[in-house]
Image (tube, helix red, strand yellow):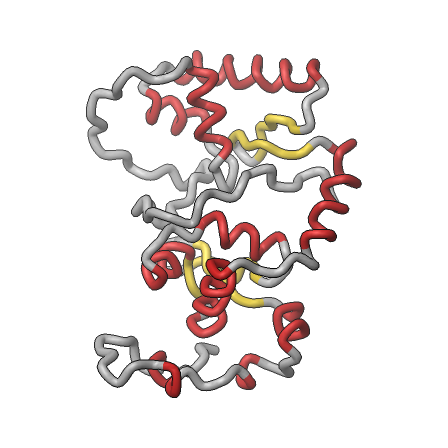
Amino acid sequence: MTDTTDMNAAHDDSGDDGTGDVGTGPGNLPDLPDLPDLPDLPDLRASLEAILLVADEPVPAVLLAQVLERPTGEVSALLRDTAAAYAAEGRGFDLREIAGGWRFYTREECAPVVERFISEGQEVRLTQAALETLSVVAYRQPVSRARVSAVRGVNCDGVMRTLTLRGLVEDAGTDPETGAILYRTTGYFLERLGLASLEDLPDLAPFLPDTVEGVEDGEDRGEVRP
């Protein structure tokens, strides 16, 4: 276990935010539309913490400044001050500037307890939402989080992070057209199900209603993408 364990908390498995899988790396800043006037917001530090808490990858200060409509210099300075304050207070997490952006990470000293927590969690039964999400990934892989959310009709980001932490789902690269991160099942997934390969997954056809229409080619027959 390294000291870069993602501290993001799993969100409620409800509501599609419609943001898809737009990367926020330093070389992939999205073109933000003209933002409406923001309502009264918490102070700047609280706003930064809220955004970074749900970030899946380092977020550049310039993007944070765009979203919050504040000068980039002010945002950068506050990020540095906040990171120093967390370190001085001995928090269980750090705010680090890595790969051109900012993100929360658990502290190195906390790695043993985080590892124990995750290991113990492996024995916990998956929720119905997790099982449904895992099924979508298994039969439609490689697939993006946005696509999984669209199939289930709810936001699956938190569940996907849980499945990744448990070693059942992993990164499978990016979609060449959209740049979205793709996911696939792991060898551990096959081991837990007692399968030799994805070809051994049961056929979905017997479980589908006769009136299903508009399903992508092959998916209504339970075929697995290579």
- Compared to 221, does 225 lie above or below? above
Q: Quadrant of residue 193?
A: bottom right
> Can residue 76 be seen?
yes
- Compared to 20, does 61 lie above or below? above
Q: Quadrant of residue 37?
A: top left
Q: Nearer the viewer, residue 168 or 179?
A: 168
Residue drawn at (33%, 39%) of the image: 30
- Compared to 120, does 81 lie above or below? above
Residue 211, given in percent of the width and then of the height, sits at: 22, 81
> Can residue 142 be seen?
no
Q: Nearer the viewer, residue 52 or 99?
A: 52
> Left or right: 71 with respect to 112?
left
* Number of marks: 0
Residue 174, given in percent of the width and then of the height, sits at: 45, 58
Residue drawn at (28%, 37%) of the image: 31
Residue 55, given in percent of the width and then of the height, sits at: 48, 37
> Left or right: 165 with respect to 29?
right
- Compared to 151, does 92 lie above or below? above
Residue 159, given in percent of the width and then of the height, sits at: 50, 53
Q: Quadrant of residue 171?
A: bottom right
Residue drawn at (45%, 86%) of the image: 203
Q: Nearer the viewer, residue 185 or 34?
A: 185
> Left or right: 212 with respect to 103?
left
Residue drawn at (44%, 44%) of the image: 12
